[in-house]
Amino acid sequence: MSYSVYQLNLPQSPEAVIFINGFLARDHSGFLWMWRKILWIKKITASSQGCVQIKAGICSPNEFVMVSYWLSENHLKHFFRSEPHRQMMQFVTQNQESLCLYNETYRPSNSGKYLNEPQGMATIYEQNLKLR
């Protein structure tokens, strides 16, 4: 299929969710943990059932942000109950001052705009493409 500029015809009540989470190292211990675990976190999240795509970026030497696209909130919740997630949170519970963690979950309410191949939410609702 050849793409140009397009939007999506989102379902009336989309099940898919967008999860944004970030890690901000507050001390040396948090800094070392974050840099040792960044690729692992991305890998285990991407391989989790229901995770469709991940976009990750380094904001500064002390901050990492990841945006993940999930088929449903239930898939995301299942990941929160997984052993890899428990392992991630173990450091946080043992070193509560070392990291600032934040996360937000969003459900799409309208389509973004896309150019060429599908990215983000378009990877989930690709069958609903509306070429312009």
Image (cartoon, helix red, strand yellow):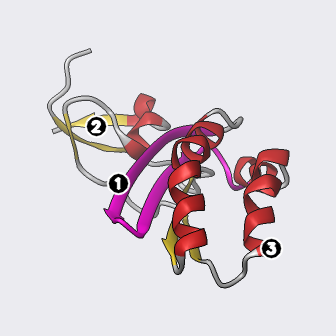
In the image, which is nearer the foreground, mark 3 or mark 1? Answer: 3
Name the residue nearer the viewer: 32 or 6: 32
Residue 123 in percent (x, y) is at: 43, 35
Kind of element beneath mark 1: loop
Kind of element beneath mark 3: helix
Residue 72 in percent (x, y) is at: 67, 49
The answer, for residue 104, to whether it is visible in the render is: no
Kind of element beneath mark 2: strand
Residue in view at x 51 percent, y 67 percent: 31
Q: Is residue 86 above or below residue 119?
A: below
In this view, the residue farthest toward the front is 28
| Quarter of the figure that contains the C terminus | top left
Q: Is residue 113 above or below residue 48?
A: below
Residue in view at x 44 percent, y 61 percent: 65
Name the residue nearer the viewer: 56 or 13: 56
Report the magenta stretch's main SS. Answer: strand
Image position of 15 (left or right of 18): right
Tell me how far mark 3 sits from mark 1, CA to CA.
41 Å
The crowding category of the residue bearing disc 2, from other C-alpha atoms within 10 Å (few below 14, some 14 to 19, many at least 20), is few
Q: Quadrant of residue 80?
A: bottom right
Kind of residue at badge 3: Gln
Residue extent of the magenta highlight: 51-73
> Quick one: label 3 or label 1, which is nearer the N terminus?
3
Q: Which residue is under mark 3?
A: 94
Name the residue nearer the viewer: 84 or 125: 84
Q: Which mark is residue 29?
A: none
Residue in view at x 59 percent, y 74 percent: 101
Q: Which residue is under mark 1?
A: 111
Kind of residue at badge 2: Lys
Q: Which residue is under mark 2?
A: 130
> Quick one: label 2 or label 1, which is nearer the N terminus?
1
Mark 2 vs 1: CB contact within 8 A: yes
